[in-house]
Image: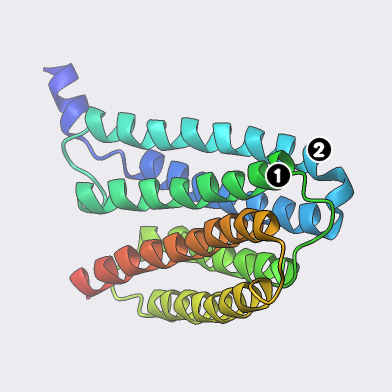
Amino acid sequence: MGQWLSWIKSNEKEILAILDNLAKKAVETSEVLVKLFSDVEHAKDRHTQIKKLEREADVLTRSVFAELNKTFITPLDREDIQRIASKIDDVIDFMEGVSGRTVSYHISSTPPFMLDISKELVKATKEVEIMISKLAHVKGNSDIINHCRTTSDIEHTIDALYREAVGKLFETNDAVNIIKLKDIYEAIETASDRCVDVADVVEDIVLKYA
């Protein structure tokens, strides 16, 4: 009987705490990415840091799913929690991909606009962190939607920088370099898209509980 009651209880604090830590990992990873593009000479060291953060994020993501499997009553819809965890993990995965490509492609100088894009991505991950921290008091909290919209605005800024960067890239004649840098640009742009995916899920949650 005791085990059954344990299963049906809400793991609200545990689940939201893990999500909050996961969002913090995204911020930390984005900040290291800025450091990487501020000093590409030491990209390998920064990539090692990011790989460590990515592995830690994977552990947190698995922990979210483990907690969901241990409980019947969840603080939010089970599918919403799963989507939030998966999308934040995706953000970190794509940032790890950016740093990994920078190292494996032997990028020796910061690609045009990449530092600006990285700094905008830090802003996006911080917005994600804020909205996740507010999920414990989501009911009637319309302020969360402002952070969702801000995340979308940041993504538009990153899109504009991405288009300008790729446009400049195709003005060059080095086909191999074009392929390498376009791959990196696309990965970091996708990371910002995933931040918006998180914001969309959170906005849906706010509207459900309005």
Residue at 35%, 80% in the rendered image: 142
* Viewport quadrant of the N terminus: top left
Query: Mark 2 or mark 1, which is nearer to you?
Result: 1
Return the mark for residue 105. 1
Residue 14 percent across, percent down from the top left:
39, 38
Residue 95 percent across, percent down from the top left:
59, 50
Secondary structure beneath disc 1?
A: loop
Secondary structure beneath disc 2?
A: helix
Tell me the quarter of the picture where residue 182 sits: bottom right
* Viewport quadrant of the C terminus: bottom left
Q: What amino acid is labelled 1 in the image?
A: Tyr
Circle 1 residues within 10 Å: few <14, some 14–19, many ≥20: few
Residue at 75%, 64% in the rendered image: 111
Nearest the eye: 166 or 47: 166
In the image, residue 94 above or below residue 70: below
Q: Is residue 111 left or right of residue 56?
A: right
Nearest the eye: 120 or 127: 120
Residue 198 percent across, percent down from the top left:
39, 61
Whether the residues at callouts 2 and 1 have beta carbons within 8 Å, the answer is: no
In the image, residue 107 above or below residue 44: below
Q: CA distance from mark 2 to mark 1?
A: 15 Å
Instruction: Quickly name the residue at label 2.
Output: 45
Tell me the quarter of the picture where residue 203 sits: bottom left
Tell me the quarter of the picture where residue 149 sits: bottom left
Residue at 37%, 46% in the rendered image: 86
Nearest the eye: 200 or 13: 200
Residue 71 percent across, percent down from the top left:
22, 33
Q: What amino acid is labelled 2 in the image?
A: Asp
Circle 2 residues within 10 Å: few <14, some 14–19, many ≥20: few
